[in-house]
Amino acid sequence: MSSALKKLEEIVSDLPAESQAEVIDFAEFLRQKELRKQSETKPKEKRIAGLHQGQGWISDDFNDELGDEFWFGEDFGIIKKDDESAA
């Protein structure tokens, strides 16, 4: 057993049971954090340029200005143009 583990065992054994449970929870948190860090450092698969070439599209009116109907919710039936009470 390493000296760090011996020291930890000595400290934890002097704590009440509730505090020992907190130490265990914290140790588990640290272990999960380390596992996440290790999984993030794994090399990612290389991306392949042009793999889906020609499969995407952009609408011809993509850059057109959106009218007031859109901004005021009239397109979605939220507000009716002639409904005075909704305003």
Image (spheres, rainbow, N blue to C red):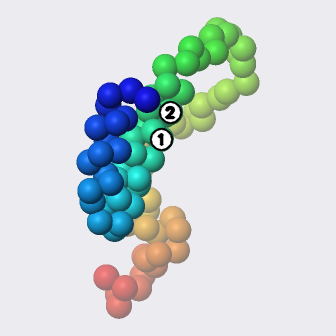
Q: State the mark number for residue 35.
A: 2
- Quadrant (top left/top right/bottom left/bottom right) for the C terminus: bottom left
Q: Residue at 27% of width from left, 60% of height from top? A: 15
**Foreground pick, 49 / 17:** 17
| Residue underneath mark 1 | 32
Task: Give the side of residue 51 with respect to residue 63, left or right.
Answer: right
The residue shown at (28%, 38%) is: 7
Residue 79, by quadrant, is: bottom left
The quarter of the rendered structure image containing the N terminus is top left
Q: Looking at this view, is 11 or 36 the one in front?
A: 11
Of all residues, the one furthest to the bottom in this rendering is 85
| Side of 55 relative to 76 (left or right) | right
Q: Mark on residue 66?
A: none
**Label 1 amino acid?**
Gln
Classify 10 Å Cα crowding around label 1: few (below 14), some (14-19), many (20 and above): few
Spatial CA distance of label 1 from label 2 is 5 Å
Residue 86, percent from left and from top:
37, 85
